[in-house]
Image: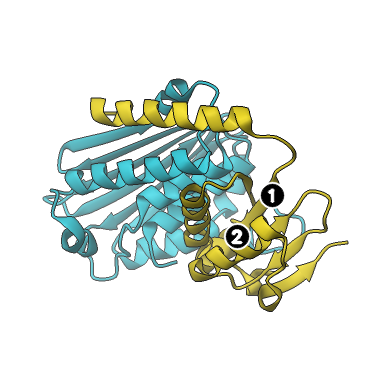
Chain colours: A cyan, B yellow
Amino acid sequence: MEELALHILDLVQNALAAGATEVVIEIKEDTAGDRLVITITDNGCGMDQEFVRRVLDPFTTTRTTRRVGLGLSLLAMAARQAGGDLQVASEKGKGTTVTATFRLQHWDRPPLGDVPATLVTVLAGAPKLDLTYRHTVDGRTFTFRAWEVQRELGGVPINDPKVLTFLKRYLEEELTSLHGGGGDDAEKLR
Amino acid sequence: MTLKSLDDLRRLREEVQKEIETRQGAEVQIIVGMGTCGIAAGAREVMTAILEELARRNIKATVLQTGCIGMCEKEPLVDVVRPGEKRITYGHVTPRDVPRIIGEHVVNGRIVEDLVVGRAN
């Protein structure tokens, strides 16, 4: 996968498959410390410690149709290739936290990619999800809480195509200004 | 959200609310494969294109997602199910194919034969 945002989408799909009703996506960019940290926390069914130990092995999966599960191992590989690592903390019945770290300036770090498209795709598939997205760039933070929009919409579902298209534009504007408002060129360099 | 965005959101809510009230009958279902294989092959861009085309042309359809269904090599996969008709599966779908699938099949019921990779009975 070429974008970190695609890995995030993949991991949130895991959380939804684990029955999560709350998901927190947190991205922290720290230029001075040369670090990028992505944390995804869910309240899904969690895993026992034995499963957590094996979970980065591509031949570990909960799937019963075949025996390969690639999602987490692909992100772990991307993190290690960019001077970082991936950690999974989980408790059966409580939920899971996945933390991926990268060296921000590392040559092999994949770009963050289209985070608004990822968030909108998550909400398209899980309109009732209590989704929080918090993105910090060198101490400045943008927070998006889906419930604020869901509350405002009343009976109108958040996954109506017009609402999602509106939200995507809104998130694009907010993230551009979080990254210094430099437009397309600045975005590409991320 | 900023006040301006909230205002825009409220205006959009009124608009969509009215459309929902005038809507009738069963809707067409569009189902996008969003497993690891689908995502890696470009399913998110296809999903985004579908949402934008439906919003732009003011078409009402239900957009759903599914996980890996075992045809990973043909991802991105998009199913279209019109009420009372059999499920048609399109494969290797790109955002450029989306206006055709929606314009031809979702709206007019004409299957886009060159993109079909499966039909359920």
In the picture provided, is A111 more to the left or to the right than A47? left
The residue closer to the viewer here, B66 or A150, is A150
Q: Mark 1 points at which residue?
A: B29
Q: Earlier in the sequence, mark 1 or mark 2?
A: 1
Q: Give the mark count.
A: 2
In the picture provided, is B36 more to the left or to the right than A85? right
- SS assignment at label 1: strand
Residue B50 location, x and y as percent?
Answer: 53, 56
Residue A162 location, x and y as percent?
Answer: 46, 41
- Above or below: residue A122 compared with residue A66: above
Q: Looking at the image, which residue sits at the far bottom? A: B114
Crowding at label 1, few (<14), some or many (≥20) Cα neighbours within 10 Å? some
Residue at the spot 29% in from the left edge and 28% down from the top edge: B1
- Give the quarter of the figure containing the N terminus of chain A: bottom left
In the picture provided, is A186 more to the left or to the right than B11? left
Q: Which amino acid does label 2 sit on?
A: Ile
Q: Subunit of mark 2? A: B
Crowding at label 2, few (<14), some or many (≥20) Cα neighbours within 10 Å? many
* Labels 1 and 2 in the same subunit: yes
Write down the quadrant of residue A135 in the picture. top left
- Above or below: residue B115 compared with residue A27: below
* Measured Cα–Cα span from mark 1 to mark 2: 11 Å
Q: Mark 2 points at which residue?
A: B102
Residue A47 location, x and y as percent?
Answer: 61, 40
Q: Subunit of mark 1? A: B
- SS assignment at label 2: helix
* Residue A123 numbered mark, or none: none
Residue at the spot 49% in from the left edge and 70% down from the top edge: B96
The residue closer to the viewer here, A164 or A110, is A164
Residue at the spot 55% in from the left edge and 23% down from the top edge: A155
